Image: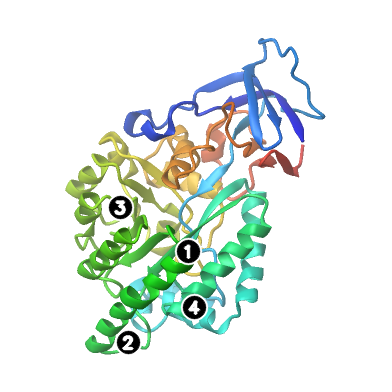
Amino acid sequence: MSLLIHNARILTLAGDPTTRRGPTTGDLATIDRGWVHISGQTITAVGAEDDKRAGVSARHIIDARGRVLMPAFTDCHTHLCWAGQRLDEWERKLAGATYLEILASGGGILSTVRAVRAASERELTDHLTERLAWLLREGTATVEIKSGYGLDTATELKMLRAIVAAGEAWPCTVVPTACIGHAIDPDATTDADRAAFVRRTIDDTLPAVTAEFPGIAIDAYCEQGAWGVAECVELFDRAQAAGHTVRVHADQFNPLGLLPEAVSRGYRSVDHLEATTDDDLRTLAASETFGVMLPCAGFHTDGRYGDGRAFLDAGGRLAIATNTNPGSAPCQSMPMAIALAARHNGLTPAEAIACATVTPAALLGLTDRGRVEPGCRADLVLLRHTDERALAFEFGGDPTDVVVCAGEIVKNLR
């Protein structure tokens, strides 16, 4: 397919994505009125409207009428594969129960674990396929999806197979992550049980994941009631030795001390950061490890948000994501995450846009997207807005008129 989109305000986010950090994060490299030519799955040319387009033709032409054209969103932290629902627990939360209280009573992640264990691989795939369609309608064309609701080898592998199967049927890109340290098995009721569960995860589940999904990122949740610092470090040391990259949930409710270990051991990202100390935030900002902030979780859970302003001012590499899951962040909308990040993480609209596109793509190792430049993958969204600041200003609606995935128009409301 060949496609020409012209008369657009283009947010190119041009430049080397691996060097975008700190004060340079919000550089959108905007073309006030420009055009983009696409051939097959690739952007072949980008120019201003007063540039000559000699030899540039296309079977499909879209007049943007001054609207904003930008890279499609990359959602780099989700738990989009699940079964069951947690509406009863939400009512408990409304009545005053905290997230950690619900977790300690066998709810939260653990209730979803029971539902996922009971579901078939096909059921998980079908549920996930439906949710992927929701994402695409709002402009997300690359999404990371974690396992982690199995907590045993067979179910973790079942989840990863479902994630891969749904991704193969989706026109865009799914990046699976093995979050095998997401919680402690609900059947581990004593200290000895807990130690045995951690041992099985490291000695049995990790090698099984390595055998079937070599190189996949390994993740864990370091928090009270979940995995401790020493347990995470042992899991991740083994994972890195087996060729895996490492990501970790940390400092959501309590700063337990994993962040310095993450930096010294070269983990790919530390995600959440709501409770991170000022010193640790500066340590992370000075490193090559990405920070990922999840404002939808703060909005739904306890009103706490990571200090994105301080992190960027200290030179950090920041991404934002939805953290879509059935309990603490039931939101699949990257536009909503952008709106919340501007209000509560201290980001400018331009920074929030970059943190939802080019930076998370770089985190996932996908430097062929998140920018509107020749040679990049043609994953684009055309907003209904003529000013990109409206993407952060408005909230609760769908701002996308056109979505292009790998050069194909998959949504067109123009």
Which residue is disc 3 drawn over?
A: 267
Marks 4 and 3, how far apart in space?
Answer: 25 Å
Q: Dots 1 and 4: beta carbons under 8 Å?
A: no
In the rendered structure, which amino acid carries the disc numbered 3? Tyr
Q: Residue at x 35, y 65 (%)?
A: 220
Which residue is disc 1 drawn over?
A: 213
Badge nearest the viewer, 2 or 3: 3
Which residue is disc 4 drawn over?
A: 155
Across and down, in percent, residue 182 comes to: 38, 70
In the rendered structure, which amino acid carries the disc numbered 2? Ala
User: Could you tell me which quadrant the N terminus lies in?
Assistant: top right
Marks 2 and 1, how far apart in space?
Answer: 27 Å
The answer to which of marks 2 and 1 sits earlier in the sequence is 2
Q: Residue furthest left?
A: 279
Q: Residue at x 34, y 43 (%)?
A: 308
In the rendered structure, which amino acid carries the disc numbered 4? Thr
Identify the mark at residue 188; answer none if there is no mark: 2
